[in-house]
Image: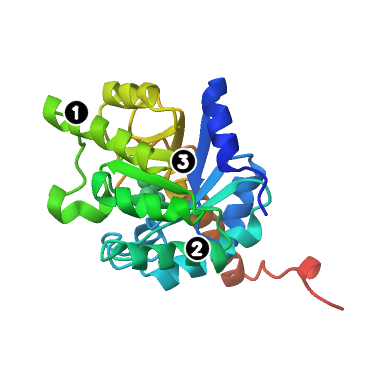
Amino acid sequence: MSNITIHDFLKKKKEGKKITMLTAYDYPFARIVDEAGIDAVLVGDSLGMVVQGLENTLPVTMDEMIYHTKMVTRAVKNAMVIGDMPFMSYQASIEEALKNAGRFLKEGGASAVKMEGGAEIAGHIRAMTKSDIPVMAHIGLTPQSIHRMGGYKVQGKTEEAAMKLIEEAHIVEDAGAFSLLLEAIPMGLGKIISEELSIPAIGIGAGPHCDGQILVLHDVIGLFERFVPKFVKQYANVKEDALKAIKTFKEEIERGAFPSDEQSFR
Ligand code: KIV
């Protein structure tokens, strides 16, 4: 059982303290993220791209999400673990959504789920909240909608689109979401939504005024090189460090420097 709960999220918002979040998909990285004191770990369907090497998140399945969520919850002692509902695990019906969300808590050991969508998932949020499954909603750029959106584009840029997102934010709050993820929207809009809602708004490319921030772990530590979105800040280059280590290992084997006496038995 993790220590940080949805109540801590709300408390942090009330106290004006920033909420920190990162994604993680496996045991070793989830341990590191938790040890760093991050408030919540999202087992994001972004694992399709950064772990599985897929083109987008659409093919990720519920079974794969549960497999990764189990690894993460096994590692995490303090952070809240949130499971990300993959494409077509909730769109077809509220009943299916409820069953799949329940799997994250029952099988995966997560404390909450995240779902992409606004007004169209209000009924899903209401049903899950009624069944004691806390929901984080996700509006703005929703990667499961890339075909409708025509790619990974900043959302809410016109006045009409911005007003629609503000309205959607209120709808998911009223439906019972405990927090809202805002992806790739202008910073001014991120500020308005964060100020208008009483639930915490967590931004990814939504500017500095959100109640908290999340990024994809592999972007933060330099382990995903296919593309780096503008909103990413890379704090390490793990790919470079790993490459250097592995090249040195190979070179030492080839010239007979590894294993030395120190790594050998007598
Ligand atoms: O799947 C994911 O990693 C996400 C990001 C917005 C954090 O949803």
Q: Which mark is residue 104?
A: 2
Q: x and y percent of residue 144 in the render? A: 26, 55
In the image, is the residue at mark 2 within 8 Å of ligand 1 by its beta carbon? no
**Quarter occupied by residue 127:** bottom left
Q: Amino acid at mark 1?
A: Met
7 vs 225: above or below: above
| Left or right of residue 73, residue 137 in this image | left
Name the N-terminal-most of marks 1 and 3: 1
59 vs 86, nearest the viewer: 86
**Quarter occupied by residue 30:** bottom right
- Distance Cα–Cα, label 1 vs label 2: 33 Å
Q: Amino acid at mark 2?
A: Phe
User: Where is mark 1, residue-wise?
Assistant: 163
138 vs 253, nearest the viewer: 138
| Left or right of residue 146, residue 19 in this image | right
- Distance Cα–Cα, label 3 vs label 2: 17 Å
